[in-house]
Amino acid sequence: MSQRWHTSQLFNKSNKIQLTALSNYWNLQALGDPLRGLRQRILRLFSLALIFLTVCTACAAPPAVARDRSFPEISLNFLGEYQLPKINFEGVPVGGLSGITYDPKGISGVTSKAYRFYALSDDKSENGEARFYSLRLDLTSSDPANISLEKVSVEGVTSLKKADGETFLWGSINPEGIALSPRNSVFVASEGRNPFIGEFDLATGKMRGNLPIPKRYIPDTNDEQQQQGVQKSLGFESLSIDPETFSPGGLDPFRLFTATAAPLIQDLDPDKANKVRLLHYIIVDKTPQLVSENLYTLDQVPMTVLNGLTELLTVGGGHFLSLERSFGLSGYSAKIYQVAVGAATDTSRIESFKGKMGMVEPVRKKLLLDLSERGIPLYNLEGMTLGPLLPDGSQSVVLVSDDNFDEAQKTQFLLFSLKGKF
């Protein structure tokens, strides 16, 4: 209901009350009154004036319907695909790319059509050491009307190491999300039974520290009796740092966001396995703080065996893009949503999402793109990042798929153009 309509209704109601009261008053006064005729004429004139005002108010042009200002008007346009061949790099298979992040410092000594990214392998130190790759992405043209991916090349690899300089033992890490920070480091999210978010030196891969993880995310057991914590291989999979909080050398605080891929054990509701938690951190020197948590609701996808939130991407102005990926009888599918957290309830004091959640406002989301409608085969899309500005001035977005080290699956890169302002 618009304010204008509401006001006119109150005005009409008020007029009717006044008109009835005046009529009763004049009629009572007119009994035995020698000036009764004059009073009735005055009453009729006054009544006509009120009726005229009421009709004019009611006939006023209806107000324009207010736009939903939670989401800016943006579009995501598909530009092209590149599939990385099955290759080895330094004796280790390149695969399992589950996260990707862009390095705006670029690649020196090459044309402006080549850009550097870092892609995280979700290898649990099984096929090789836990690691991330340095990638070079080349565009086909600088012509704004003809932009696509020409080639993706692997240029380097960095092993992830613990604070003592030792590499991670098999199964002790399950790396899934990666985000480049403004202080020459990358943050890496591990979704395993020992979930953590660590900061690693960009050059050496050595761990600098961990973010504080609330106890409710830590599994209380590793068997079917588990009552608390992340589900197996469904912990922290997404990771993003707000580009608006970058500063030279990372001297200023910056914001980091992550989310669970699926509900915590204590949040599981029968037939409602869609309540996941989004975490907001402030990184300040060596004392990072968890600021808040929010409820994010996954879309329910029928006939699927796998459905989860695989990536979050901060795009500025308190807005995100989210990537939800599912797998069912028809193969992989994925959707990208706009997400706004401004009006969401802080759920950090809520131990369980089971039962009624009527008082909790989740983050708002709006479907931006159903990737199944692009007319290309989709694979296990898990990583998403902002890339460089394109020749037409729009913002690029790059997605990557995890091939699960399976010969039948592909490492797929997708390039998009993001247009609009946040």
Image: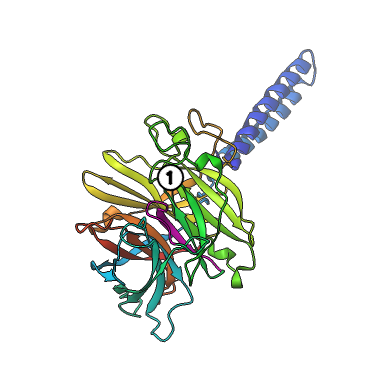
Residue type at tag 1:
Arg
Q: Quadrant of residue 283?
A: bottom right
Write the residue at 54% across / 57% down: 256
Q: Nearer the viewer, residue 409 or 378?
A: 409
Left or right: where 49 falls relative to 276: right
**Quadrant the N terminus occupies:** top right
Furthest toward the top, the residue is 32
* Closer to the camera in the image, 319 or 28: 319
Q: Quadrant of residue 211?
A: bottom right
Q: Is residue 241 above or below residue 224?
A: below
Q: Is residue 67 above or below residue 266?
A: below
Q: Is residue 251 left or right of residue 232?
A: right
Instruction: Specify start and end residues of the magenta stretch as a single range.
Output: 167-182
Q: Is residue 318 magenta?
A: no
Q: Check disc 1 and report its element: helix, strand or loop.
A: loop
- Is any atom of residue 313 visible in this view? no
Residue 28 image position (x, y, % from top left): 76, 15
What residue did someone put label 1 on?
A: 193
Residue extending furthest toward the left? 408
Q: Nearer the viewer, residue 323 or 109?
A: 109
At label 1, counting other C-alpha atoms closer than 10 Å, the crowd grade (few under 14, some 14-19, many 20 or more) is many
Residue 220: x %, y % from top left: 48, 36
> Along the line of sight, which residue is nearer the eye, 184 or 412?
184
Vertical arrangement, residue 32 with respect to residue 26, above or below: above
